[in-house]
Amino acid sequence: MKKPLLLFLLILLSFASPAQKFDKLALTPPMGWNSWNKFACDIDEKLIMGIADQLVETGLRDAGYIYINLDDCWHGQRDSQGFITADPVKFPSGIKALSDYIHSKGLKLGIYSDAGRTTCGGRPGSFGHEYQDALTYASWGIDYLKYDWCATENINPMSAYQLMRDALRAAGRPILFSMCEWGNSKPWTWAKETGHMWRTTGDIYNCFDCIDDHGNWKALGVMQILDLQEGLRQYAGPGHWNDPDMLEVGNGMPANQDRAHFTMWCMLAAPLILGNDIRSMSQETMSILMNKEVIAVNQDSLGIQGLKAEAKNGVEVWLKPLTGGDWAFCVLNRNKESVNYTVEWQRFNMDDKVSNRSTEFYKTTYNIRNLWTSKPEGTTAKSVNLTIPGQDVVIYRLSPKIKK
Ligand code: GLA
């Protein structure tokens, strides 16, 4: 069937039945790699294929990082009928060929567009071309769409994102829908049925505790983004995640900061989208990104975002309910200097309304496993004295031992 005719039928069909997002696509937080944080507009098919090869070779794919996402600047022009094409110089083989290659590696391909007339990088946006673009992505074999919010003038975010969700549904290929309107319209309050994840803040910046001020917009350090997640945990769950933006691990922060960043994103049940050059990463970066026990905290099937139980003198204690009656217990030292911290378990007895789970340290003793040293560290029967280096974390997995 001719493309314009198919498009007409799709639009007609979508009015006949109310559309839904594709379910079961993100039952745990999505994991993958995205080109933006490291390469910005400097991308081409050779780079993307090289990254795909490395995702497989390093074992990252088998650790769960299965999406490989083109961000801004893959686009060429629209053709005479308005269909989007890839940049012929950067992607001479076309996106379908790239997607075949990615799929042959057991990976999935993500792409990027924008609800406005142009993307943030000035490429053609999807405004007025939503059904056409969804159809094109489906025909290319795309599995994931990140949908940005630049050049949207005064369009309504709820309608704009619902329109693209409906277009994706009508095109028929299950495509994970990642919403990127920076949290402006509080998407957590309305987007559960629209997207599989939504950005909660502006862009991340490659620093632990700073703000990169551009005048009319600000990029935020890891701690600044963490603080903006306050009050959002009740809105996340299987199929619909708060997205505090992509990872900066391996992009220049020291190992302690990278470890803290990665751990907190795991505690937040955040999508884990790598943003570094995995073709040349250090062993240290690799060991952070591939820690299976820390990833398991993120990927836990309950899908409950962690909560901040205590914050004092730059030291925060976070808890996250896990399957099997387990808890992740994390102490974050935000200070530049190391701190001594005594974990008095009885201070953390609590009922968590969001998960309907209680810690009950007064009647349950937990075995402690340190997830960064991969060693057992006794039980919660007595306090634990910790020395935590500056801007670093300790994360434990607590598993019930004896019920008293
Ligand atoms: C916005 C998004 C970023 C990235 C760029 C691309 O700033 O928030 O994640 O996609 O656009 O231009």
Image: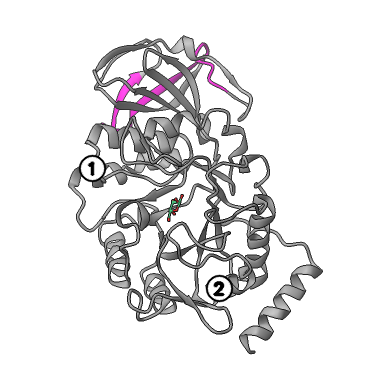
Q: What residue is rendered at 34% in x and 51% in y?
A: 37
Residue 328, position as x, y percentages in the image? 44, 29
- Please name the residue that numbered disc 2 is placed on: 138
| Residue 398 appears in the figure | yes
- Residue type at tag 1: Gly
Q: Is residue 333 above or below residue 173?
A: above
Residues packed near mark 1 inside 10 Å, few (<14), some (14 to 19) or many (20 plus) = few
Residue type highlighted by circle 2: Ala
Q: Is residue 249 magenta?
A: no
Q: Secondary structure at mark 1?
A: loop
377 is within the stretch colored magenta = yes
Position of the N terminus by quadrant: bottom right
SS of the residue under disc 2: helix
Query: Which of the two marks, 1 or 2, is nearer to us in this view?
Result: 1
Which residue is painted at 61% across and 74% down in the image? 132
**Residue stretch in magenta:** 358-378
Q: 164 or 195, which lies in front? A: 164
From this viewpoint, which residue is outermost toward the bottom? 1
Left or right relative to 17: residue 247: left
Residue appearing at x 53%, y 65% in the figure: 125
Q: Compute the Cα span from label 1 to label 2.
A: 36 Å
Q: Is residue 326 visible?
A: no
Outermost residue, right direction? 16
On screen, residue 236 versus residue 310, left or right, reads right
User: Residue 134: where, in percent of width, then height?
Assistant: 59, 70
Residue on which the image places disc 1: 252
Q: Nearer the viewer, residue 246 or 115?
A: 115
Q: Is 385 placed above or below 271 here? A: above
Residue at 54% across, 53% down: 149
